[in-house]
């Protein structure tokens, strides 16, 4: 009889929200059932339904940046649960102040402007049930964008900085293409090729895969050369599994 595999401390599921199908991430501790949402962009009833489905209690709300599809449900989620909103960097407050205008423009209902309870800075840390996540300020797509990552678990929540085969748009107000490239190559690549990342849209990938094949930031284009590190994984690797 084979020994049972150890239960991972945290599990991750993706909850696609809004007509833009933004990857809201739901993380939770398997023992306490305490949970965090990363980028609750909309569809508040779907988000609350996911918590109920897995029997979870929300303890954290984390935002990578201020765009409607990533932050639109944060204010109502805070009102309903009493959980503080953390992130993004203060430079994205102007985006958070126009969520309602953006929602009308895109025909999306329910989005509300929000002011975080805590802005995040480069080097800050977030915590869920004893698991620490590091924060990197990664401007370019938006000026106040942050990436939330856990080195031991080899996972990063990158918002709209990087996608499988692409990168974030930089044609929005205060976007900057060179800043975005620099954020990816100086803040993300050094974390290691084996980091699995959850983008704001589309499938997950690894930094190593994007360094090889991404037509915008492959090493052959950027000249980046760095060594990856390998560490034990604490988080369930089924990050592509979706709750729908």
Image (cartoon, rainbow, N blue to C red):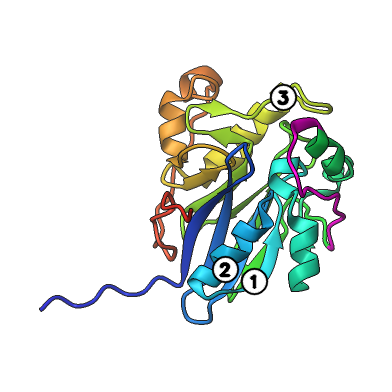
Disc nearer the start of the sequence (2/3): 2
Residue 180 appears left or right of 151 = right
The x and y percentages for residue 117 are: 84, 63
What crowding class fits label 1: few (fewer than 14 Cα within 10 Å), some (14-19), or many (20 or more)? many
What percent of the width, then of the height, locates residue 182?
A: 66, 30
Region of the chain picked out in magenta, as a range: 105-117
Magenta region's main secondary structure?
loop
Q: Nearer the viewer, mark 1 or mark 2?
A: 2
Secondary structure under the numbered disc 1 in the rendered image = strand
Question: Where residue 120 sits: x, y (%)?
Answer: 78, 55
Q: Does the magenta-highlighted stretch encompass residue 110? A: yes
Q: Is residue 187 above or below residue 7?
A: above
Is residue 152 in view?
Answer: no
User: Which sits in the foreground, 136 or 14?
Assistant: 14
Which residue in the structure is indicated by mark 3?
Answer: 170
Mark 1 or mark 3: which comes first in sequence?
1
Q: Residue at x 75, y 35 (%)?
A: 107
Q: Nearer the viewer, residue 224 or 49?
A: 49
Badge number at residue 58: 1
Residue bearing the label numbered 2: 51
Residue placed at 49% from the left, 19% from the top? 215
Per the image, is 168 magenta? no
Task: Single out the mark in the foreground, 2 or 3.
Answer: 2
């Amino acid at each position: 009889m084979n020994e049972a595999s150890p239960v991972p401390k945290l599990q991750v599921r993706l909850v696609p929200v809004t007509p833009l199908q933004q990857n809201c991430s739901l993380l939770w501790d398997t023992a306490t059932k305490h949970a965090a949402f990363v980028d609750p962009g909309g569809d508040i009833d779907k988000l609350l339904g996911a918590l109920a489905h897995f029997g979870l209690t929300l303890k954290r709300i984390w935002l990578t940046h201020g765009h409607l599809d990533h932050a639109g449900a944060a204010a109502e989620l805070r009102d309903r649960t009493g959980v503080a909103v953390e992130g993004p960097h203060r430079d994205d407050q102007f985006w958070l102040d126009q969520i309602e205008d953006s929602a009308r423009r895109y025909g999306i209902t329910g989005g509300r402007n929000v002011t975080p309870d805590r802005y995040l800075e480069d080097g800050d840390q977030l915590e869920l049930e004893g698991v620490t996540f590091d924060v990197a300020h990664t401007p370019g797509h938006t000026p106040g964008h942050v990436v939330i990552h856990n080195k031991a678990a080899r996972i990063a929540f990158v918002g709209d900085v990087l996608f499988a085969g692409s990168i974030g748009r930089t044609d929005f107000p205060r976007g900057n293409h060179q800043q975005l490239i620099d954020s990816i190559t100086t803040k993300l690549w050094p974390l290691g090729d084996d980091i699995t990342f959850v983008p704001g849209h589309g499938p997950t990938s690894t930094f190593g895969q994007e360094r090889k094949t991404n037509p915008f930031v492959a090493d052959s284009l950027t000249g980046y050369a760095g060594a990856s590190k390998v560490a034990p994984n604490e988080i369930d690797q089924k990050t592509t599994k979706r709750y729908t």
